[in-house]
Amino acid sequence: MKISIIGTGYVGLVTGACFADLGYEVCCADVSSEKVNLLQSGVMPFFEPGLGDIVQRTLKSKNLFFTSDANIPASFADVIFVCVGTPQDITGKPDLSYLEEYFLNLIKTLHENEDFIKNSDAKKHVFIKSTIPPGTIKHLNSIISNNSLRDKIVLSSNPEFLKEGSAVQDFMRPDRVVVGSDNQESIKIAAELYRSILWKSERMLVTSPESSEIIKYAANSFLAMKISFINQIARLSDAVGGDIHEIRKGIGMDERINPHFLYAGLGYGGSCFPKDVNGLEFVMQSNNLSSELITATNSVNDSQVRYFLEKILHLYSPEELQKKEIAFWGLAFKPNTDDIRESVAIKLLRLLAPIVKHIHAYEPIAIKNAMTELVEIKNISYVESSLDAIKNSHFLVIATEYSQFWNMSPEHFMQLKDKCIFDGRNILDKDKIESMGIQYFGVGR
Ligand code: UGA
């Protein structure tokens, strides 16, 4: 089967490369010819474990190619996955202009194709992978139904549930594939496409387009809500002297709750949770529904970095802080990605920079993006290793939970001039560190 992918951002590139690796012939299209040229020569626009190898392999086998010609995807395949961005506008409303632009262009291209218009059986099965507010498929159908292509473009929703840092694995071993469609032919196509990776057949769920759209928003918002919930409980734990690790285990042993996504810390970041929680809030409100839970999820997260900063401000006076050099570990929004969008590490660093003397920052993967993002900060140096960061510093701040930080020999922390660690991800062994005479501040511990 031939597939076209529209948009080579995170979702589009992973989807296209993985389908190509599964043996399909895939055309990936992007408006940026510069990006397309790089991709066609096997150069990745972002870091994602394993993805570069797959792209290079499938380019070589000719299962995959890239184009910036907007007309090619529709002529190449009858199955199209739309993966264009749906960012928020300044009001928090999801901006659907890229999506609408794509459909207007598709309609125009198909109109120019006489064979396609004349052939009454010819159809384009279009699956939308972009995260879209509930009601979008209905809205897009209304654009399509205004012209003669009404029955020839069949729209379905097929949200993605990939996590950055493990996207290839998530694609190849999905928890579930959700297909929101009213069209039997599209449902059959989706079942065929995903057949080889649906190792348990019940993992493909067919729903209405509206349910599928809501599933995506609700799944991300529920996970974000779990994180905000545990962060709020961590504050109580701090106040009364509990240990959030014990609390997480204790509540997570209840299978109805489970222990996943209950790690307290600096809060959630990235390109998905903040945007999708806002998106859900917006859609609820535009349907005249109250959204207290969603709003609270957001506001707890918004205050979590500040809550953590207060721990530092509680220990040091402003005058003392002005004299401190600090080691800062991790700038990406999570480990194993070079993505710094909405990174809470970056937010914390921006709050700290004006009030300390100097920051020695170490970031193993996202360093290039972080340096560009933080260009206005002058009292920072980027070091080559986590140990280099510690060497000349008074205290350490951990902001992203890379495995190499978890496994650092605690003896190294003795080099910190103030013998003090602020662990924003709760990854270090508190008891061991305290037994060495080092002060330790986590979140909820
Ligand atoms: C998230 C979802 O997990 C995916 O299922 C979804 O497909 C994706 O968004 C998307 O919509 O595209 P992602 O943003 O890659 O994936 O990252 P997560 O692993 O979910 O982490 C998000 C943030 O939550 C990170 O900042 C992480 O540090 C934080 N987090 C996560 C916590 O603070 N505590 C936890 O227990 C888990």
Image (cartoon, rainbow, N blue to C red):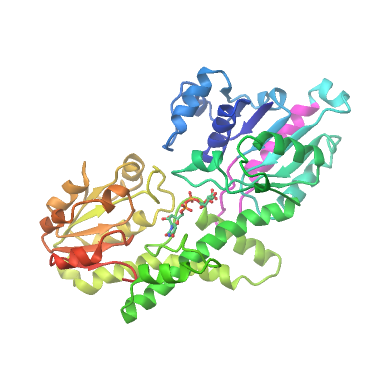
Residue at point 76%, 37% (across, down): 188
The x, y position of residue 306, in whole percent, is: 35, 68
Q: Is any atom of residue 224 visible in this view?
A: yes
Residue 308 or 264: which is nearer the viewer?
264
- Residue 258 vs 119, above or below: the answer is below
- Residue 376 vs 268, above or below: the answer is above
Residue 290 quadrant: bottom right
Magenta region: which residues? 84-111
Q: Quadrant of the C terminus?
A: bottom left
Residue at point 11%, 55% (across, down): 415
- In reply to whether residue 107 is colored magenta, the answer given is yes
Residue 33 or 348: which is nearer the viewer?
348
- In reply to whether residue 418 is colored magenta, the answer given is no
Is residue 237 rendered to the left or right of residue 101?
left
Residue at point 21%, 48% (across, down): 386
The x, y position of residue 377, in whole percent, is: 27, 51
Q: Quadrant of the N terminus?
A: top right
